[in-house]
Amino acid sequence: MRIVMRSMAIVRLLGLLGLVGCGERVASRVEPPPLVEPPPLAMPHPSTPIKPAESVAKSDATDVKSVKPRSIDDPVAVSFRVPQSALRPGEPFEVAVNFEVASSYEIHDRSAPPPAMSTFIELELPSGFEAIEDWTDPTSVRSGLPDGHMVYAGKATFTRKILIGDGVAPGQYALSCLFGYQACNARQCLRPVESRLNVSLTIQD
């Protein structure tokens, strides 16, 4: 009788062990976090015009110039320069417009056919001032693009002779230069840019 009761106790104990910890363990599943797409890069809207930077007046020992510096959207700096020394009526002088094109970019030359925008320069002179020669152009080079059209790259300086009329009175005179260009690299052509620079010239007796 004792043997039977002892056997039943053992059977009950084994059953309890099976229920508590001897059964098969089921691993809990951890769901990975959802993937989040990165935000798209901000690109300028194609219809947004490029606003050239404000011009900056500078001077050195020989010249006075107005400068349009480069910007994030515009890889070309432009300066308009006149002599700093005071001039007299009847004297000629030379103005210079200098383009500095960033590395890997180029601008079309002044004879580029449509649809390309050719580089252009126009002077607006006070009464009594006269342009006596055409622009002296820098040397153009072959584009790095497959068609090999002519372009300006690096530093390109244009000069022109101006004559002060005999009847011009002494004083300060403003000269204006309107210019335009289109910068391109191996991947794209940027929006054409037009801007204006102004300088002051002193006429003495």
Image: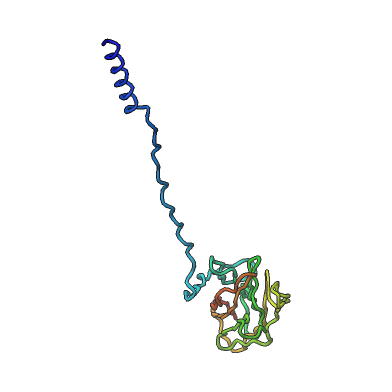
User: Dividing the image into 4 quarters, which one contains the C terminus?
Assistant: bottom right
Tell which residue pokes out farthest to the top in this image. Answer: 2
Seen in the image, is 47 located left or right of residue 3?
right
Between 29 and 183, the residue placed more toward the observer is 29
Which residue appears at 27% of the width and 10% of the height?
2
x then y, percent, for residue 29: 40, 42
Rendered image coloring scheme: rainbow
Tell which residue pokes out farthest to the front in this image. Answer: 1
Tally of numbered tags:
0
Which residue appears at 30% of the width and 11% of the height?
3
Between 151 and 20, the residue placed more toward the observer is 20
Instruction: State which quadrant residue 95 falls in.
Output: bottom right
Height in image: 112 above or below 24? below
Between 40 and 187, the residue placed more toward the observer is 40
**Can residue 55 be seen in this snapshot?**
yes
Which residue appears at 41% of the width and 51% of the height?
34
x then y, percent, for residue 201: 58, 77
Height in image: 29 above or below 7? below
x then y, percent, for residue 109: 67, 79
**Can residue 120 be seen in this snapshot?**
no
